[in-house]
Amino acid sequence: MSAPTIYYMRHGETDWNVEGRLQGGIDTPLNELGQTQAAHAGRVLADLFVRHGRVAANLAYVASPLRRARSTMDMVRAELKLPPGGYALDDRLREIGYGHWEGSTLAQAQVSHPELYASREVDKWGALPPGGESYASVQVRMRDWYDSLKADTVAVAHGGTARALMVALGIETPASASDLYVEQGVVYLFSNGGVTRYS
């Protein structure tokens, strides 16, 4: 099979995004703006399907099991006039785990674990938060997820997993991806060895 095309969306905004808190595996809900962003991403995706001659029901759909991603997928599918549910959940798409730092701001993380935080400043990709995981390990599970795809796919997950996928596919380097901002309310199209943003 040729390389699958992926229509990838980050979940909509949460209050913790606004507050600058590390979410990781904490199951935070979308806020009002996040719901608006999710619906907008669904409309962008619907337009892309028209432009690409795609039938929405013919693609595979998968989301991170975290609530903010599932809620976003539900709203995206509503915009596509697809029935609720009807998509898979894959734990490999969950956000990078920040361990003991989850719920903290970066400033709080720096105070609680200054040496670990300093190592993160030097090597964000390889740094291991206390009790968490590195971007390098997320890259491995995202490559494993990508290699398991059997068809063109719509995916809703997280900023960290988007960065890891870009590195796994050779689109970005660990250095360039480390500080790459992954937007909410847009669609990232992974196709032909590259990624294109649609808003």
Image (spheres, grey):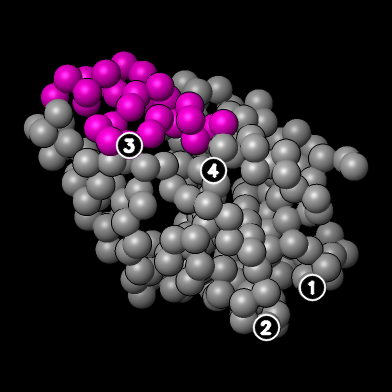
Q: CA distance from mark 2 to mark 4?
A: 26 Å
Relative to the observer, which residue lies in front, 104 or 97? 97
Residue that badge 2 annotates:
83
Observer-nearest residue: 59 or 19? 59
Chain-order first, disc 1 or disc 3: 1
- Residue 182 lies, in percent from the top left, at 48, 45
Residue 160 painted magenta = no
Q: Is residue 198 visible?
A: no
Q: Residues within 10 Å of mark 1 (few under 14, many from 20)?
A: few
Q: Quadrant of residue 53?
A: bottom right
Q: Which mark is residue 57?
A: 1
Residue 162 numbered mark, or none: 4
Q: Are marks 3 and 2 in contact (CB under 8 Å)?
A: no
Mark 4–mark 3 Cα distance, whole angstroms, equals 18 Å
Type of amino acid under label 4: Ala
Is 119 contained in the magenta span?
A: yes
Labels 1, 3: front one? 3
Q: Range of the magenta residues?
A: 114-140
> In the image, what residue type sits under mark 1?
Ala
